[in-house]
Image: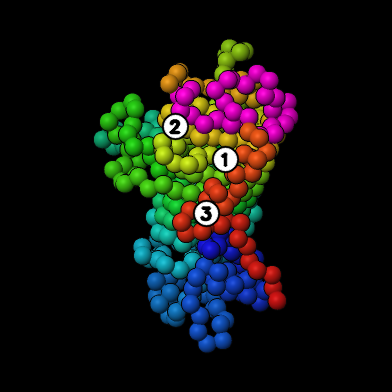
């Protein structure tokens, strides 16, 4: 099985302590690397010689890089560290990011990269692009160039970081993504994703756009390849469709915060949490497991989801829901045909907004047996047996 988390948050300037070194060894062993000699895995601290050269220095090296905004690491920007990784990288590269504010637009298309922040509330990457911003030729950025962070490669890991788009409310700037994730086996733990409209896009793109002839963005014209994504103990904040896309994604024990847009009408819809575009034949879309749905939006003003495409699949299992959740639960986006094609379901919702009494009649309430089918294995394993719950083995 592939390892999702290497837990290298205790990388320090002097290198790695023995316990962490051994954890890294076992982690790489689990990922399928070959070993020779006594089986000890050397963890290299990058010091400016070029990651590609370091990786060629010996077989199965686990490369680590330190980024520090104050200049105390190997690089002062995250993008500079990413740029040193070979495009054909096949070994795990750990980029440890010290506390700081990193104002940059980050683009990652190299596999097997881990970004590990020092502290989730103090390791912040922020940018302020938005859909209505224009390129020099006058063409708008549209939704998919508005990201703060783009991850377009497989086997990405993000931990203990905050991703923010500070462009502002959608009413003023349109869509503004904090994170555009479009790689298979992507794993985010203890991260904060903060924005307004369209905070998190979970790629791939749908097959065709609706409102114009192209989507734009870094995946324009690329083949659609289904991705699996895992979010654990994350905080995701926004207002309109702030979790959207076509991925198979599991949100495990996350806090989903619906922001108050300050609509003028007291009974106006304040927002929608999920806007899935699940492909027609995909067995799963979004699953929220044991999440807390919080927010400062008015009572009954936020819907659990609406269908960006007509085969949207979204399920909430054992989630606590605040009073901001609309009693009807779900919205159809004025797509009456979607009543027969979407799969919207809940199991054991609790809290002021969790009552099923007034849910729309084209949503479902699952039985316990049905809910049990939505395990990590059933949702994310795929043909390669990926398990994002795989952890380091205990130290011997």
Q: Nearer the viewer, residue 52 or 27?
A: 27
At mark 2, the secondary structure is: loop
**Label 3, label 1: how far apart the Cα atoms are:** 14 Å
Q: Quadrant of residue 110?
A: bottom left
**Is 284 in the magenta?**
no
* Residue 45, x across and y down, in percent: 53, 73
* Residue 161, x across and y down, in percent: 58, 51
Q: How would you rate the neighbour count of disc 3 (Cα within 10 Å): few for under 14, some for 14-19, many for 20 or more?
A: some
Position of 249 with respect to 389 (left or right) is: left
Residue range of the region highlighted in magenta in the rendering: 338-365
- Residue located 46% across and 62% down the image: 112
Q: How would you rate the neighbour count of disc 2 (Cα within 10 Å): few for under 14, some for 14-19, many for 20 or more?
A: many
* Residue 197, x across and y down, in percent: 50, 31
**Label 3, label 2: how far apart the Cα atoms are:** 22 Å
At mark 1, the secondary structure is: strand
The dominant secondary structure in magenta is loop
Residue 381's disc is 3
Question: Which of disc 1 and disc 3 is earlier in sequence?
Answer: 1
* Residue 323, x across and y down, in percent: 70, 24
Residue 56 to residue 108: above or below: below
Residue 29 visible in this rendered orientation of the protein = yes
- Residue located 41% across and 47% down the image: 226
Residue 266 to residue 342: above or below: above
At mark 3, the secondary structure is: loop
**Label 1, label 2: how far apart the Cα atoms are:** 15 Å
Label 1 sits on residue = 287
Do the CB atoms of the residues marked 1 and 2 lie less than 8 Å apart? no
Q: How would you rate the neighbour count of disc 1 (Cα within 10 Å): few for under 14, some for 14-19, many for 20 or more?
A: many
Residue 290 to residue 54: above or below: above
Q: Quadrant of residue 368?
A: top right
Label 2 sits on residue = 311
């Amino acid at each position: 099985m592939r390892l999702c988390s290497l837990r290298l948050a205790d990388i320090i300037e002097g290198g790695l302590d023995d316990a962490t070194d051994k954890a890294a060894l076992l982690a790489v062993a689990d990922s399928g690397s070959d070993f020779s000699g006594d089986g000890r895995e050397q963890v290299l601290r990058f010091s400016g010689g070029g990651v590609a050269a370091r990786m060629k220095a010996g077989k199965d090296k686990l490369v680590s890089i330190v980024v520090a905004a104050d200049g105390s690491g190997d690089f002062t920007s995250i993008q500079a560290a990413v740029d040193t990784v070979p495009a054909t990288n096949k070994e795990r590269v750990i980029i440890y990011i010290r506390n700081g504010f990193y104002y940059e637009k980050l683009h990652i298309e190299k596999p097997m990269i881990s970004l590990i922040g020092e502290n989730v509330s103090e390791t912040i990457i922020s940018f302020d692009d938005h859909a209505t911003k224009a390129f020099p030729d006058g063409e708008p950025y549209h939704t998919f160039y508005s990201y703060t962070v783009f991850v377009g490669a497989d086997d990405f890991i993000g931990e203990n970081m905050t991703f923010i788009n500070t462009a502002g409310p959608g009413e003023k700037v349109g869509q503004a993504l904090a994170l555009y994730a479009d790689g298979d086996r992507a794993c985010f733990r203890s991260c904060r994703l903060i924005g307004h409209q369209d905070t998190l896009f979970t790629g791939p793109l749908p097959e065709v756009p609706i409102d114009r002839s192209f989507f734009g963005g870094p995946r324009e014209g690329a083949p659609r390849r289904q991705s699996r994504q895992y979010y654990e103990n994350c905080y995701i904040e926004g207002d309109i469709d702030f979790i959207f896309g076509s991925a198979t994604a599991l949100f495990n024990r996350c806090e989903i915060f619906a922001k108050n847009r300050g609509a003028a009408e007291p009974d106006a819809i304040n927002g929608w949490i999920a806007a899935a575009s699940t492909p027609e034949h995909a067995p799963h879309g979004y699953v929220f497991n044991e999440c807390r749905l919080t927010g400062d939006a008015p009572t009954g003003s936020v819907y659990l989801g609406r269908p960006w495409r007509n085969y949207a699949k979204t399920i909430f299992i054992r989630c606590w829901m605040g009073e901001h959740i609309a009693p009807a639960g779900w919205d159809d986006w004025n797509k009456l045909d979607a009543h027969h094609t979407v799969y919207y379901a809940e199991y054991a919702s609790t809290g002021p907004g969790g009552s099923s009494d007034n849910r729309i009649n084209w949503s479902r309430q699952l039985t316990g047996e049905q809910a049990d089918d939505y395990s990590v294995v059933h949702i994310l394993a795929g043909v390669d047996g990926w398990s994002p719950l795989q952890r380091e083995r205990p130290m011997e």
